[in-house]
Amino acid sequence: MTIPPRLLALIATAALGLAATADAQPVQPPTAVQPAGAPEGTWTGTSRCTAQAVICEDETIVIRINRSAQVPLYDVAFSTINGGAEMPESRLTMIYNTNNHVLTGRFNDEHKRLNFYALAVKGDNLAGVLLVDDRTIERTLTLRRSVTAPIAVPPVNGDAASSASSSSSAASSAAASSSAATSSSASSSQ
C-alpha cells in the first residue's frame, strides 16, 4: 500500500498551514541565506504526537538536510534532543519536488511498518507529517531553519598560546581563532 506523492505533498502543505497557526511564535528574521524553498540546512523544532498515536512522546528534534549527488535526492538525518544532548536517530534519502517544495520519503520502522515522511519547505520554516502504513498521521513536525555554530578545534597540546606559535599546523591556526573568539581580552593583548 503506497500513498501517492501528490497526496503526501498536500498533507505536508496542510501541515505547514496548521503548524503556523498552532505554534504562533514571533516572526524572526531569516537565519540562513538560502533560496526560498531550498531544503538544505539544519532545522530545529518539535515533533508532536497526534491523538491517533498509541505509543508516542513529543520531542525536540534536529533535521539536517544535504543535497545528494543524485538530483533530486537529499540525505536527511534526524536527531532528537535528550537532556540537552543531540542523539542521532535515523537517516533517510528523500526526494525533493521543486514545484511544491516538498521532500518525501518512506522507510520501514522497527515494527516493520511502512512509514512516510512529507516535509514542506516555506522560507525558513519546515513543517510536515509522519504517516504509518495505515495512513494514520502519527506525528506533525514544525521546524525553523537554524545556523550551526562553527566547531571549535581544541589546541594540539592543550595550550592555546603554544599552539598559536606553531606556524606550520592547520590545527594551531584553528586553535588561535578559537582562543580569539572565546577570549576577546586575550586576542586584543596579542
Image (cartoon, grey):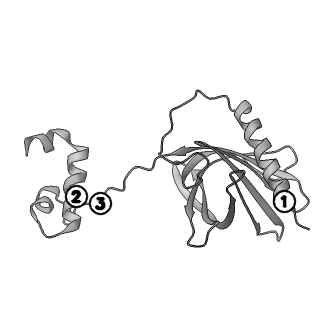
The answer, for residue 109, to whether it is visible in the render is no
Taking the spot 81% from the left edge, 55% from the top edge, the residue there is 8
Which residue is nearer to you in this view: 125 or 96? 96
Taking the spot 57% from the left edge, 29% from the top edge, the residue there is 27
- Name the residue tied to disc 3: 153
Helix, strand or loop under label 2: helix
Q: Position of residue 184 (x, y in %)?
A: 19, 40
Whole-number angstrom distance, CA of label 3 to CA of label 1: 42 Å
Residue 151: image quadrant is bottom left
Circles 2 and 3 in contact, beta carbons < 8 Å: yes
**Tag 1 or tag 3, which sits nearer the N-term?**
1
Residue type at tag 2: Ala
Crowdedness of circle 1 by 10 Å Cα count: few (<14), some, many (20+)?
many
Residue type at tag 1: Val
Crowdedness of circle 3 by 10 Å Cα count: few (<14), some, many (20+)?
some
Q: Quadrant of the N terminus?
A: bottom right
- Name the residue tied to disc 1: 132
Taking the spot 55% from the left edge, 62% from the top edge, the residue there is 66
Viewed as shown, does residue 15 lie left or right of 183? right
Q: Position of residue 187 (x, y in %)?
A: 14, 44
Residue type at tag 3: Val
The answer, for residue 137, to whether it is visible in the render is yes
Which residue is most to the front?
99
- Name the residue tied to disc 2: 175
